[in-house]
Amino acid sequence: MENALTNATSQTNFTGLDWGIVVIYLLLSVAVAFFVKRYAGNMTNFVGAGRAVGPWLGIATLTGTEMGLITVMYSAQKGFTGGFAAFHIGVIAGVVAFIVGVTGFIIVRLREHKVLTIPEFYEKRFGRRTRILGGVMLAFGGLLNMGLFLKVGAMFIVGITGMNPDGNSLKFVMVGLLVLVLIYTVIGGMISVVITDYIQFVVLSIGILVTAAYAISEVGLENIFGTLDTHFKGDSAFNPLSAEGDFGVEYVAWMGFLGIVNCALWPTAVARALAMESTAAVRKQFTWSSVSFAIRMIIPALLGVCAYVFAMTKAPDLNRLFHEEGVDNIYAMPIFLGRILPSVLVGLLTAAMIAAFMSTHDGYLLCWSTVITQDIIAPLFKGRLDNPTRIKITRILIILIGLYILYWGLVYEGKDDVWDYMAVTGAIYFTGAFSLLAGGLYWHRASSTGAVLALLAGTTAIVGLSPVQQSIHHWIPGSIPERTINAVNDGTLFYEEFTNPEDEEEESSFLRDMAVNFVMIPFEEAKPWRYNGLKEWTAVVHNSNGESQAAAIRYSDSNALELSLTPYWLAEAGMVERGRSGSRKPVNTVQLEFNREPNEAEAIKLFERKYSHLEVERINWIREKQWRSFEPKPGDTVSIYKPLSGARVGLMTITFTLIMFILGSLISPNSKPREATDE
């Protein structure tokens, strides 16, 4: 896999001239931060740009933040895997943003209360403990949400510039990007964020439109439709509600709620509303920004569609890379653009994308650090922190959060699409926040008890992440407890045969069956006695040492499972270090993994590229290996569960938080009705 990916990224048109374009742009961005440093002397200016942002600058900065490189990457990934059907995400986002702008739902009333952050409203409406808890939940969900931003941004740069994705290139790019963003966010605060967002809005808007035109001309409009018709099932490439596609009714409903989240609940967008000069400017900002809310996802999704067609029809190496060898398809769009865009244009686009990366990171870093300072730390000190101290704490937190996202990007190994990962992690905060904001602003009986229960209920959204589901899969309704493995044959596990309960005589109970069916509506019930009754479920194998590993089920029978294992080959090389006098000093044996069997010359080349100061003396062996952690054997156990989609978990969490909020408010109302004021 490593060799194939390295070869794919190396075929780029990116040159030294393009690097010069990128460097000049980045230096100009940092210069802006130093120029506006003088205006960031108090917390209102540092966080809210003095609440003096006009509507048109507000539209630009909102677009600049919300159309970041992470947005381009996850939208392109959705287009690559879902075709034109992925456009529904952007269409829904635009329609909902327009409705919010016209009605002023949530955002106008928040602006009227003159708060700097959402949890500050919680205190006005529900009390200090709710503000602190709300700040904790917001920071927890928000930090998880942006945990992959840095890594995905670095993957774009590596993919489009032709850097070697093996070794430490990705890590070096992540560190460089982080340092750049930290410098001007720490120095200039929201004022530098707004100004750089405006510049980046202009650069990115032009760059993304020109790129889309190039992409369509490269693959051909007729070829796009013909390829999608050929390679997607039914109308799934065009209809998001198709039962054969990646989306469906649940997913579309989930996107509808996320449309509200993107503009009325998500703190980075709300922060722009709270920095506006008036409520009329807020309405205009979101009404006109609805166009950008749609375009920011539709055009990148189109680039993903073009990348898919290019791989299927013009680049067989990319087709093998993403569809046979299992390389992360988040690389598809940047590799595609690196190959089709000419020099200079590819440099300008890369500068625009790095600009998009910075405009998102500066807003997010400032937002989460402000929440922790204003809504967790300051309330604990009961107002004893002065402005200089708060700004200093915020700047320290920006650096700490930056180090966290560097760490998280390196260690997280979930298999969720980036967009779905962000939706699930964000739901930890926004499912509860929706209840508190909508209820607190529009329902006079909303109580602090209901607010606390809703915030806590939102944590259940974390179950939408695949690593979490795997760790708690025994608790997912419909899962099958551990069964002892009797025999193992390659990727097939055998165990005692399941019996068909329909053949057993059992007294039925209408009430019991109705209750069971009601509980199981959101889940799929296992039917392991049927052929392929567990197909596409997940099996988790456990051994006596406490180790476990998971794999999707390719097919099932009443007494066996065949797992979808990804084979890989392990090459072991003896390396030597050549001295100045020509002496050869043996070095420890090293290993590399491949997702396909390379020839010996390819293996030697890759070893010597990764260990540039050493020379390969011999390749000891290359062998196929299918199990990543351990080889199952009779006596080990296997448990089985149906993974829950992020959309399903999200919709369930919304329902759960609303129920807890309403019940808590009705059962335990506030002793004295409390209404938020704008003082």
Image (cartoon, rainbow, N blue to C red):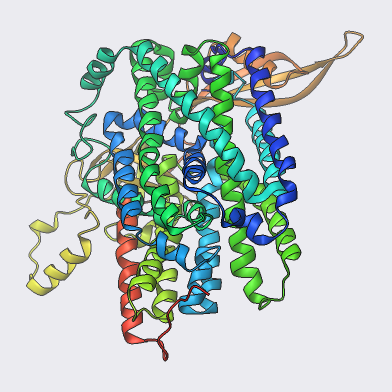
Task: Count every numbered label the image shows and give the total.
Answer: 0
Give the x, y percent position of residue 270. 47, 55
Residue visible at 27% across and 42% down in the picture: 560
560 left or right of 582 in image: left
Q: Residue 182 lies in what quarter of the image? A: top right
Decide: is 565 above or below 4: below
Q: Residue furthest right?
A: 581
Can residue 3 be seen here? The reply is no
Give the x, y percent position of residue 252. 26, 46
473 or 14, which is in the foreground?
Answer: 14
663 or 313, which is in the foreground?
Answer: 663
Can residue 594 be seen here? The reply is yes
Give the x, y percent position of residue 469. 40, 54
Decide: is 303 above or below 275: above
27 or 132, which is in the foreground?
Answer: 27
183 left or right of 456 in image: right
Residue visible at 64% across and 35% down in the picture: 174
Decide: is 297 above or below 591: below
Give the x, y percent position of residue 282. 43, 54
Q: Residue furthest bottom?
A: 671
216 or 630, which is in the foreground?
Answer: 216
